Amino acid sequence: MTVSAQFDTSDGIRLAYYEDDFTDPWKSPPTLLLLHAAMGHAKRWYAGVPTLARHYRVLRLDMRGHGKSQVPAADSDLTMDRLVDDVRELMAKLGTSAVHIVGNSAGGYVAQNLAMQSPELVRSLVLFASTPGLKESQARTWLPRVAKEGLRNFLAATIEDRFPPGHDPGHVKWFLDEAGKNDTAWIGRFVGLMTTLWWMDELHRIKCPTLLVVPGAETVGHAENYETMRERIRDADLIRYPGLPHNICDIVPERCAADVHAFLRRRFPQDRT
């Protein structure tokens, strides 16, 4: 039902992934790939997987340097193309052709670039709180603070950017503890790369049906960028979650999963399991 495994990329990095499939055994379900946010890991999807895995073969990747995946050497190359290749190589290993992709924040950055570079591999995109890169954001100001304060302390000090007041303190502590396990130098490199990238003018290259799910009280990027995205992507719907900050997949995971499922059922009725 749930399988965890690893594979080696073409540049020698071992990546972890999970496969969840609770669909009827006699059916052939469509594949849904989940890509997590920076500083996260595949297990952050835990609350949405039960809903999704009843209808889809769900793949969850720990992106390089995150979760149980290997942290690359400090002198290794880190580019968006390399992150996209990681996804391509996972799909090739599993013999998976075109998939639906759900990307949360930085996971959505990778998903967008895969859809632009290899449209034949992406049937649809669902992007949660995911703009076309982080160049047009305040994220570049995080890095000096993380280096000085430590990753967990920085996130704790800015927790209101990620969770609303009164959110379950046990959940917040778990989020901080898990994020704090990351290699700080790698996270600095990873987030640093994202703050140099911006591809708004290339979004017309995304051909597949796309759902933009927008935090109504966005705290990382600029909310108006999502409206521009809807204009630039040929076939895009937009849902707004009023009053919520950036981490909508953590705050309301069941709602997120329900919206993914509703979008895919509406746009791909032939896939119904």
Image (tube, grey):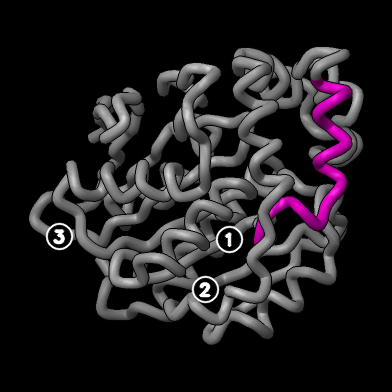
Q: Which mark is residue 258?
A: none
Q: Please say if 140 is above or below 146.
A: below
Is residue 18 highlighted in magenta?
Answer: no
CA separation in Å, label 2 and label 3:
23 Å
Q: Which mark is residue 28?
A: 3
Tag count? 3
Determine whether the residue tagged by mark 3 lies in a helix, strand or loop: loop
Q: Residue 166, percent across and down? A: 88, 34
Task: From the image, tell me which residue sits under label 2.
Answer: 210
Query: Could you tell which of marks 2 and 3 lies nearer the N-terminus?
Result: 3
Task: Tell me the kind of residue under disc 2.
Answer: Thr
Quarter of the figure with the C terminus: bottom left
Q: Nearer the viewer, residue 172 or 177?
A: 177
Task: Tell me the kind of residue under disc 1.
Answer: Leu
Task: From the image, tell me which residue sits under label 1.
Answer: 127
Quadrant of residue 221 within the rendered picture: bottom right
Local packing at callout 3 (Cα closer than 10 Å; few below 14, some 14-19, many 20+) is few
Local packing at callout 1 (Cα closer than 10 Å; few below 14, some 14-19, many 20+) is many
Camera-near label (2 vs 3) is 2
Determine whether the residue tagged by mark 2 lies in a helix, strand or loop: strand
CA separation in Å, label 1 and label 3:
25 Å
- Which region of the structure is painted magenta? 131-146
Mark 1 and mark 2 residues within 8 Å of each other at the beta carbon:
yes
The residue depicted at 86 percent of the width and 13 percent of the height is: 149
Determine whether the residue tagged by mark 1 lies in a helix, strand or loop: strand
Looking at the image, residue 123 sits to the left or right of residue 187; the answer is left
Looking at the image, residue 78 sits to the left or right of residue 121; the answer is right
Task: Tell me the kind of residue under disc 3.
Answer: Ser
Quadrant of residue 140 within the rendered picture: top right
